[in-house]
Amino acid sequence: MDTMTELEFAHLSKRIRGKLTALAQRFIRASGLEVEAEDIVQEALIALWQLSQKGYPIRDAEALAVRITKNNCVDRYRKRHIRFEPVTDMPIAGDLRATAGTEQKDIETIRTILHRELSESQRQLLYLRNECGLTLDEMAKVTGRPKASIKVAISTARKAMLDKLKTMG
């Protein structure tokens, strides 16, 4: 489905609002959240509309609306369980040097994995994606490779890195 018109969106939201509300209500009862189901549904529908207007490819608007609603429920649940405490008067051990040392070690570990586990092509694609911030379309133009091939190569490279990190502990 391409960008929805306001009329199409109005019909869709009218048709699925009850289903989304029931889903949100079940989650609220199960989790003990103190929130209105209608608020969650409204946020989900707004997000769906915004995605549509930005040109996000929506194959099944109802399924996407359900997923957004579930994600909104989980987000609210997680936010409820986060406690924030001020740290202004608390003594804090350590300093920035310890953090910088840990970060430097992490960077070195990642570089080692990059060079030992990945091919030059995979390293190049990860660099273009992560460091240069290129989209798949832009990467396809730069490398001359099909988008699907680039996507698979990046996914394979990330999986290889993650597997190696897991084996390292």
Image: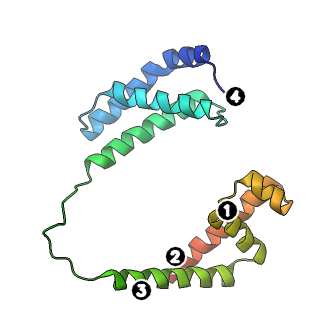
Kind of residue sitting beneath label 2: Lys
Query: Which residue corresponds to the image point at 54% horizontal and 15% vertical from the top-left?
Result: 10
| Circles 1 and 4: CB atoms closer than 8 Å | no
Between the residue at mark 1 and the residue at mark 4, the CA separation in whole angstroms equals 26 Å
Quadrant of residue 18 in the image?
A: top left
Residue corresponding to mark 4? 2
Spatial CA span between label 2 and label 1? 23 Å
Distance between the alpha carbons at the discs numbered 2 and 4:
40 Å
Q: Amino acid at mark 4?
A: Asp
Please tell me in which quadrant of the rendered image residue 5 appears: top right
- Nearest to the observer: residue 32 or residue 90: 90
Q: Is residue 42 left or right of residue 81?
A: right
Instruction: Give SS at disc 2.
Output: helix
Residue at image coords 42%, 86%: 101
Q: Residue beneath label 2, please?
A: 166
The picture places residue 139, in percent across and down from the top left corner, at 76, 58
Residue at 41%, 26% (x, y): give it: 42
Kindly report which numbered mark, 2 or 1, lies closer to the viewer in this rendering. Answer: 1
The residues bearing labels 1 and 3 have C-alpha atoms spaced at a distance of: 26 Å
Image marks 1 and 3: residues in contact by CB distance under 8 Å: no
Which of disc 1 and disc 2 is earlier in sequence?
1
Q: Is residue 139 above or below residue 57?
A: below
Q: Is residue 169 visible?
A: no
Residue at figure coordinates x 61%, y 85% from the top left? 112
11 or 129, which is in the foreground?
A: 129
Looking at the image, is mark 2 or mark 4 nearer the viewer?
A: 4
Q: Amino acid at mark 1?
A: Arg
Tell me the element at label 4: loop
| Residue type pointed to by label 3 | Gly
